[in-house]
Image (cartoon, grey):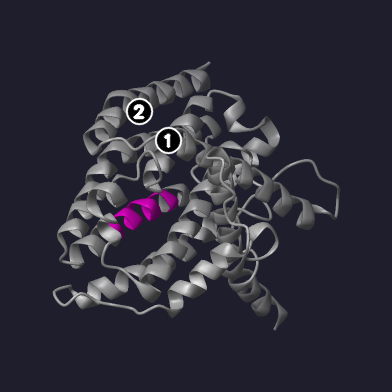
Amino acid sequence: MEPVILPVLQTLVFPGFLFLIAVSFLYEWLDRKIYAWMQLRAGPALAGPVGIMQPIADFVKLMGKEDITPAYADRRIFGAVPVLMVALILTFWAVVPVTGAAGLVSFRGDVVFAVVAMTFFCMLIFLGGFSSSDRFSLLGAERAVLQLLGFEIPLMLSITGVCIHTGGLSVSEIVSWQAENGWSILGPQAMGFFIFLVAAQAELERIPFDIPEAEQEIVAGWLTEYSGRKLALIRLAKDMELVFISGLAVALFLGGPIGPSHAGLEWLLYPAYFLLKLALVVAVLALVRGLFARVRIDQMVSFGMRYLVPLSLAQVAATILWRLI
């Protein structure tokens, strides 16, 4: 019985679903605190010690609000999108290593599996906005797909550079290589890490790339018609996406959860290393969010095609030369 119970507990509790949800709420609080600090504001302060329970309070509040579906919306797609977003991130989280070199699921090519998750998430955003049958939602959905052209290619190329550099096509192989040879970011992948973070900021639709949700221009973009439980699930999915993408950055560039340890203490130290590195990536993304203003959609696509794509191609070429030398 025990060999069956352990994988179930790992999937549902740690480092699985409940762990991801708890960490997502924690790092949403961290992100809001850093953003508020940069704007000389207090940020979350009332719910729990130093406001640490505020994300949970917001989620519970939204779950209790009225859930409205527009009369002309495609009810099936409109209602399915929030659930599919949460399910998608929970599924693909399995490849992120938390307690060792491998995640809950590890196979050759799971790096591609992780990239597919991010593309599917963007497709769900488009379906959510398109199914709302609202002019602002349609504009937000179109912007999300157009923005995809600007960051998807550099994102994939930055990951390709890591795969070439380490010679692995699975997250576990990449983490194991770094355990023996040092973090990827300390070598020729430093530029790849920068490109990954910029593309991740666009993937997460965070300032300066929050173009599909620009409240000053199109109300709330593709989210305009969502409310109540559906909006709560979407917000939860976005928080989990932040942790998922940051976790990928940790695994690909910062050695994953592997670090200095003592025999028998890996079960404690590796998750601690993972959370610390994850906090570092989230803090960098929060600083970028606080430092810049929103760009236009044409500026975003132009920046991606004119600068990020050539940089990522140069980084891949440099990695190939490094391997040959």
Would residue 56 be seen by someone viewing this image from the given angle?
yes
Q: Nearer the viewer, residue 49 or 232?
A: 49
- Residue 87 at x, y percent in the picture: 42, 68
Q: Residue at x 33, y 78 (%)?
A: 67
Give the vertical position of 13 relative to 163 (above or below): below
The residue tagged 2 is: 308
Q: Are marks 2 and 1 in contact (CB under 8 Å)?
A: yes
Q: Quadrant of the N terminus?
A: bottom right
Q: Residue furthest top?
A: 325
- Checking the image for residue 198, the label placed there is 1
> Would you say residue 189 sits in the magenta stretch?
no
Name the residue type under label 1.
Val
Residue 14 is labelled as none
Q: Which residues are magenta?
A: 114-125
Q: Is residue 265 left or right of residue 275?
A: right
Residue 210, position as x, y percentages in the image: 34, 45
| Apparent side of residue 1 relative to residue 11 in the rendered image (left or right) | right
